[in-house]
């Protein structure tokens, strides 16, 4: 195979003997490949010399490789080093030495499961955790309600993901959910026993951070907030309504000078729309963040019907409402708000978190006039590879999301370009009345859109660079990353230091006359849908 792009999807094995083979050549009966090419899910280049004489080779596709390797030697996958090579290829293990992996060799094996087979069952004694090598698996939660045995879907796992580790963290040592082979061709896993798990927790910092239950806060929660309980809160009014429930302005029953936003979500609706993974991801990501441009999550609650998120209250209203009332923003005003968004995205992207739902409705003004990012239901930690979930608001979707090509952090830059356009004109650039037509317009590209005179020369140049069809060509996706956006001509003279320090005067300062002044929000009628049914299945154990 000559040097050049490959999809890392094959490994070949010489079948015909040859004479006078140089040392760097692969002799008959041996295979050649690069395990990092096979196990990393990015484009790689494989450099292999052509054979000097005619040869016959067998080519194996990547999904079949683990089973072939495990059958060709002893049952232990690590005996032929394939399992160890796979673990070494994972980003979280990149700092571990060969000697460390040698110690694990007696505690690692390879296991394959047919489609639909249970890898482990909820309630069983946990004796292993699993890393997926090929295929996919899913996790489900069996209801704990008496008389019910329904399985609630939790998430889908892909190559490189691991699961089953919670059995080593619980007091009873049991699996807390079901693990099931999901792909039609089955799933192949590297299986680690408890001793291997404990070695990884002790030696591998990245693994420890990923595994140990709750995300670490960057700052300690103030003691007065840490003590708040759900029944300490009094609802003042509704600030917003969404698919899962409402966001209410709340105060403390014992102290009306304190204000919070309480996001209240119906558990039955979360389950019905298969959003458990997104809600849990939102909670975990927000608990990790401590950024002046992202709305803070203080703590979570639950009862038999709802989940609750107690959040920072931003009483300046939605940026979308301000834009609606004004029609559009002048350059300097738009520049300030886009600057706030850039600071939020910079904070997230450094941590490999993609946001995926950028739009004026998800930007709130605090009482000072600064913008904060809210609603992290589509946010996700990428762990060094692309994600494939189709999500987001149609007018803001990047082409690669529509085409299901897989997307990464650069999808946020596309949305940033769309947001810049909307703030300057009052409407998004890609609108077709209905979703399919909107997607078709997006796929025609930004160059097919006529720029109005309200978009200045440099603003238009920035939008075009952010909305490149190719994700790798977008401003922000190259070597300089998000700093390239901040250095663009449109931002010449902009006080980035003042913005970051919050000493820069905002262009619009909302009228907020007290901690319970909700006049900057639209009015919402009372919820007349009645009380949702109880959900006591237990999938929300970590809220």
Image (cartoon, helix red, strand yellow):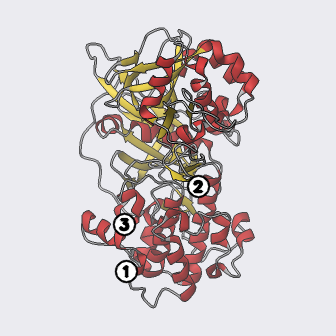
- Residue 56 point in image, percent of width and height: 46, 36
- Pointer 2 residue: 294
- Residue 367 point in image, percent of width and height: 58, 64
Q: Say whether disc 1 or disc 3 marks the residue closer to the N-terminus.
A: 3
Q: Say whether disc 3 or disc 2 marks the residue closer to the N-terminus.
A: 2
**SS class of the residue under badge 1?**
helix
Please state which of the two labelled residues, at mark 1 or mark 3, is closer to the viewer.
Answer: 1
Tell me, for residue 448, which label it has, or none.
1
Q: Residue drawn at (48%, 80%), measured in percent from left and top?
A: 424
Q: Are marks 1 and 2 in contact (CB under 8 Å)?
A: no
Residue 55 seen in the figure? yes
Q: Quadrant of residue 252?
A: top right
Q: Farthest residue to the bottom: give it.
A: 453
Does 175 appear above or below 217? above
Q: Say whether disc 1 or disc 2 marks the residue closer to the N-terminus.
A: 2
Q: Are marks 3 and 2 in contact (CB under 8 Å)?
A: no
Distance CA(mark 1)–CA(mark 2):
34 Å
Of residues 451 and 136, the one nearer the viewer is 136
Please state which of the two labelled residues, at mark 1 or mark 2, is closer to the viewer.
Answer: 1
- Residue 233 point in image, percent of width and height: 49, 39
Badge 1, how many Cα within 10 Å: few under 14, some, many 20+? Answer: few
- Pointer 3 residue: 395
Please state which of the two labelled residues, at mark 3 or mark 2, is closer to the viewer.
Answer: 3
């Amino acid at each position: 195979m000559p040097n050049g792009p490959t999809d890392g999807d094959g490994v070949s094995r010489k079948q015909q003997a040859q004479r006078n083979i140089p040392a760097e050549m692969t002799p008959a009966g041996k295979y050649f490949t690069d395990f990092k090419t096979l196990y990393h899910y990015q484009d790689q280049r494989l450099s292999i010399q052509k054979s000097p004489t005619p040869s016959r080779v067998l080519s194996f596709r990547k999904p079949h490789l683990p089973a072939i390797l495990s059958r060709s030697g002893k049952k232990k996958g690590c005996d032929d080093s394939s399992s160890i090579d796979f673990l070494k290829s994972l980003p979280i293990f990149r700092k571990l030495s060969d000697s460390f992996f040698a110690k694990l060799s007696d505690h690692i094996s390879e296991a394959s499961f047919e489609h639909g087979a249970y890898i482990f069952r909820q309630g069983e004694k946990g004796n292993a955790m699993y890393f997926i090598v090929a295929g996919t698996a899913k996790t489900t939660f069996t209801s704990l309600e008496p008389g019910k045995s329904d399985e609630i879907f939790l998430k889908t796992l892909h190559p490189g993901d691991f699961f089953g580790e919670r059995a080593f963290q619980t007091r009873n040592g049991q699996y807390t959910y079901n693990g099931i082979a999901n792909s039609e061709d089955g799933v192949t896993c590297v299986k680690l026993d408890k001793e291997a798990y404990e070695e990884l927790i002790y030696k591998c910092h990245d693994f420890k951070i990923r595994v140990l239950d709750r995300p670490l806060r960057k700052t300690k929660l103030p003691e007065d907030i840490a003590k708040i309980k759900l029944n300490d809160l009094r609802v003042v009014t509704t600030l917003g309504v969404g698919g899962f429930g409402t966001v209410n302005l709340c105060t403390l029953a014992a102290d009306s000078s304190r204000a919070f936003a309480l996001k209240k979500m119906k558990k039955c609706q979360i389950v019905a729309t298969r959003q458990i993974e997104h809600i849990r991801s939102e909670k975990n990501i927000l608990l990790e963040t401590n950024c002046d441009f992202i709305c803070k999550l203080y703590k979570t609650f639950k009862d038999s019907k709802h989940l609750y998120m107690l959040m920072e209250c931003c009483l300046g209203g939605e940026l979308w409402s301000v834009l609606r009332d004004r029609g559009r923003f002048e350059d300097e005003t738009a520049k300030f708000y886009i600057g706030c968004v850039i600071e939020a995205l910079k904070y997230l992207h450094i941590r490999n978190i993609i946001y995926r739902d950028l739009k004026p409705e998800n930007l709130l003004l605090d009482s000072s006039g600064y913008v904060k990012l809210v609603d992290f239901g589509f946010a996700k930690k990428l762990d060094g590879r692309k994600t494939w979930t189709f999500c987001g608001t149609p007018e803001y979707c990047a082409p690669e999301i529509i085409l299901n090509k897989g997307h990464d952090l650069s999808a946020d830059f596309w949305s940033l370009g769309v947001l810049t356009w909307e703030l300057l004109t009052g409407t998004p650039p890609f609108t077709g009345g209905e979703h399919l037509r909107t997607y078709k317009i997006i796929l025609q590209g930004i160059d097919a859109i006529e720029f109005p005179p309200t978009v200045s020369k440099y603003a238009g140049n920035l939008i075009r660079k952010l909305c490149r069809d190719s994700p790798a060509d977008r401003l922000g996706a190259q070597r300089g990353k998000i700093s390239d956006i901040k250095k663009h001509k449109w931002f010449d003279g902009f006080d980035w230091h003042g913005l970051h320090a919050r000493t820069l005067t905002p262009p619009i300062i909302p009228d907020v006359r007290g901690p319970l002044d909700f006049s900057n929000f639209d009015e919402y009628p009372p919820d007349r849908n009645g009380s949702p049914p109880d959900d006591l299945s237990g999938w929300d154990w970590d809220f």
